[in-house]
C-alpha cells in the first residue's frame, strides 16, 4: 500500500488493526483504486500469510456455474465431470477467498453463497456430505450495494454478512499528494521489468501528473508510467515524453509545445512504435518507415531513442 494522505494513512492503520482477525471484509471504491491490492495486503500481513489467497471474478460466474465453481463437484455429477474437483471455498481453506466485483454476483445464486458463509461448510455438486471450511471472505465492488439492495439486485442479509469490516478506497483525484509516491513506486517497478535505468520524472512532468484527473485511478497512472519509461528510453521522463505516453489530456493546462517540438514528439512516438512492433529490428523498421538505415540511426540519436529500445521493451 503506497500513500501518505490522511485517507490512506487511516486505511493502513485499520488494516494493521484487523489483520489478526478472520472477519469478513467489504472493500469499496472506483475501478482502478487498488481494491485487490488492499485485499492481498490484509491477507499477507496477517494470520493468513502462509495460507491460500484465492481470487475470483464474480462477473465471470453464471447461475449454472456458481455451485460447481465455488463448492466443487463429484465425478459424474454432470456431463464433463470426469473426476472429483474441489471448489474455490475448499481451495481457500485456512486463508482468504476474495470475491471481486461482488455486485455482479448472480442474484439467483446469492442465497447459496449466503448459506455457505453462514454454515462455514460446502457441499460439492453431486455429493451429500458437507465439508467444513475455515476461510475469511473478502469482497470488493465499485457498485453502490445499498442502491442495489433497493433495486432488488442484491440481498440485504448477504450484504450484512459481508460488511463486517469495511474499507472505502478514495479515488486518486482526491489524494494528489500520493501521486509522487506512486510514480516513484512504478518507476522502480518498470525499471526492473523493462531493464532500463530511468531516474524518474522531471519536476514539470511530475506536476502534470499531479494535475491530471485520473479517471482510471491507479491503474491508469501505472500504465502511463510504464509507457513513459519506454518513450524516455532510460532518460528522465520529461513533459514531452509524458505527452507522447499519455496524450495531451495528461499535461497541465499551462503546458504547450511549439511546432518543432510537437513534430519531434510525433516522430519519436512513431519510430518507437514501429521499433517495438518489429522487436527492435532496425532494417525492418527503416523499410517500414521508408528511410535508409543510416537515416534511422541518425533520427534515433537526434530524438534520444535508445539503440536497444525494441529489445528492451520486448524483454520486459
Image: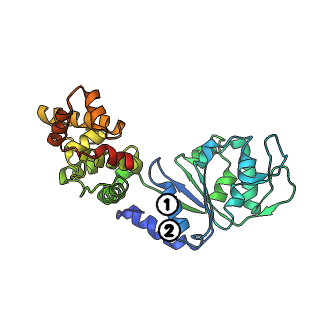
Relative depth, front residue between 85 and 255 = 85
Mark 2 neighbour density, 10 Å: few (under 14) some (14–19) many (20 or more): many
Q: Which mark is residue 15?
A: 2
In the image, residue 24 sits, relative to residue 111, either above or below, namely: below
Q: CA distance from mark 2 to mark 1?
A: 8 Å
Frontmost of labels 2 and 1 is: 1
Which numbered disc, 2 or 1, marks the residue that appears first in the sequence? 2
Tell me what residue is drawn at x 53 percent, y 56 percent: 27
Contact flag, marks 2 and 1 (Cβ < 8 Å) = yes
Classify 10 Å Cα crowding around label 1: few (below 14), some (14-19), many (20 and above). Answer: some
Q: Residue at x 29, y 54 (%)?
A: 196
Q: Position of residue 194 (x, y in %)?
A: 35, 52
User: For residue 254, what is the image quadrant?
Assistant: top left
Q: Is residue 252 visible?
A: no
Residue of label 1: 38
Specify how the rendered protein is coloured.
rainbow
Where residue 77 sits in the image (x, y, percent)?
84, 46
Amino acid at each position: 500500500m503506497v500513500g501518505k494522505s490522511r485517507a490512506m494513512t487511516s486505511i493502513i492503520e485499520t488494516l494493521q488493526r484487523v489483520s489478526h482477525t478472520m472477519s469478513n471484509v467489504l472493500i469499496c471504491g472506483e475501478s482502478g483504486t487498488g481494491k485487490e491490492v488492499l485485499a492481498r495486503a490484509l491477507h499477507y500481513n496477517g494470520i493468513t500469510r502462509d495460507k491460500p489467497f484465492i481470487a475470483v471474478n464474480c462477473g465471470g460466474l453464471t447461475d449454472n456455474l456458481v455451485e460447481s465453481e465455488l463448492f466443487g463437484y463429484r465425478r459424474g455429477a454432470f456431463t464433463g465431470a470426469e473426476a472429483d474437483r474441489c471448489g474455490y471455498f475448499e481451495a481457500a481453506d485456512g486463508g482468504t477467498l476474495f470475491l471481486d466485483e461482488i455486485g455482479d454476483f448472480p442474484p439467483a445464486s446469492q442465497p447459496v453463497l449466503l448459506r455457505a458463509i453462514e454454515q462455514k461448510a460446502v457441499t460439492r455438486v453431486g455429493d451429500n456430505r458437507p465439508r467444513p471450511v475455515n476461510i475469511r471472505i473478502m469482497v470488493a465492488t465499485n457498485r453502490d450495494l445499498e442502491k442495489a439492495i433497493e433495486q432488488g439486485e442484491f440481498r440485504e442479509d448477504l450484504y450484512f454478512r459481508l460488511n463486517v469490516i469495511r474499507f472505502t478506497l478514495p479515488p486518486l483525484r482526491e489524494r494528489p499528494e500520493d501521486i509522487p509516491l506512486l510514480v516513484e513506486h512504478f518507476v522502480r517497478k518498470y525499471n526492473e521489468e523493462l531493464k532500463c535505468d530511468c531516474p524518474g520524472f522531471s519536476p514539470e512532468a511530475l506536476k502534470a501528473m499531479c494535475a491530471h484527473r485520473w479517471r482510471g485511478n491507479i491503474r491508469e497512472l501505472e500504465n502511463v508510467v510504464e509507457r513513459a519509461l519506454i518513450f524516455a528510453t532510460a532518460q528522465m521522463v520529461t513533459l514531452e515524453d509524458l505527452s507522447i505516453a499519455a496524450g495531451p489530456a495528461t499535461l497541465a493546462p499551462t503546458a504547450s509545445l511549439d511546432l518543432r517540438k510537437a513534430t519531434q514528439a510525433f516522430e519519436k512516438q512513431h519510430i518507437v512504435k514501429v521499433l517495438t512492433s518489429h522487436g527492435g529490428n532496425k532494417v525492418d523498421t527503416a523499410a517500414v518507415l521508408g528511410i535508409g538505415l543510416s537515416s534511422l540511426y541518425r533520427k534515433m540519436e537526434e530524438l534520444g531513442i535508445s539503440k536497444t529500445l525494441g529489445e528492451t521493451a520486448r524483454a520486459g
